[in-house]
Amino acid sequence: MNDASTLAISLFSELLTADQLLRARLNKVLPKKMEISHFSVLNHLGRGGERTPAQLARAFHVTRGAMTNTLGKLEMAGYVHIRPDWDDARRKLVSISPAGKSARDAGLAAISPLITEMVGELGDEKVRAALPVLRELRVKLEQD
């Protein structure tokens, strides 16, 4: 293997391992029965506006079936409202409920100390330096 291949493999190995470790830590601190996917969707919807399930699936890079499953769980918990689109009866629109906003806030309160601690240990300077590279990598991956 050449140096470029070794570097690429090292980068992706670190990213994948960091992802697994971060997910495990987040799962430990999130409120009971809240999964990372649930929190992520609530956080996305909490920024305002209704979204279709297809828009949410695209935003999270998952299949429509996976998003339908997540939304079903969130609806059963009372965290989202799913209604027909009055302009196109074939579509549905999803919005966050007041209970969903509370659950999102509880999730945010649970993960904030963990994230703040990790960033504090790394240092603001290192995190600021890493963000542009990670963003650029994400953008490249989204294009495929």
Image: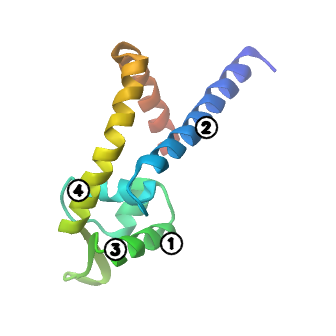
- Residue at the image position 33 percent from the left and 46 percent from the top: 110
Locate the N terminus by quadrant.
Answer: top right
For disc 1, the marked residue is: 65
Amino acid found under the numbered disc labelled 1: Gly
Is residue 85 rendered to the left or right of residue 20?
left
Query: CA separation, marks 2 and 1?
Result: 24 Å
For disc 4, the marked residue is: 46
Circles 3, 4 touching at the beta carbon (< 8 Å): no
Circles 1, 3 touching at the beta carbon (< 8 Å): no
Q: Label 4: state its secondary structure.
A: loop
Q: Label 1: state its secondary structure.
A: helix
Query: CA separation, marks 3 and 4?
Result: 16 Å
Query: CA separation, marks 1 and 3?
Result: 19 Å
For disc 3, the marked residue is: 77
Is residue 128 rendered to the left or right of residue 14?
left
Between disc 3 and disc 4, the foreground one is 3
Say whether disc 2 or disc 4 marks the residue closer to the N-terminus.
2
Disc count in the image? Answer: 4
Amino acid found under the numbered disc labelled 3: Ala
Between disc 2 and disc 1, the foreground one is 2
Task: Residue 32 in the image: state x and y as whole percent.
Answer: 41, 60
Amino acid found under the numbered disc labelled 4: Gly
Tell me: residue 119, above or below residue 93: above
The image quadrant that residue 37 belongs to is: bottom left
For disc 2, the marked residue is: 16
Is residue 15 rendered to the left or right of residue 87?
right
Q: Dot 2, crowdedness within 10 Å: few (<14), some or many (≥20)?
A: few
Say whether disc 2 or disc 1 marks the residue closer to the N-terminus.
2
Query: CA separation, marks 3 and 2?
Result: 31 Å
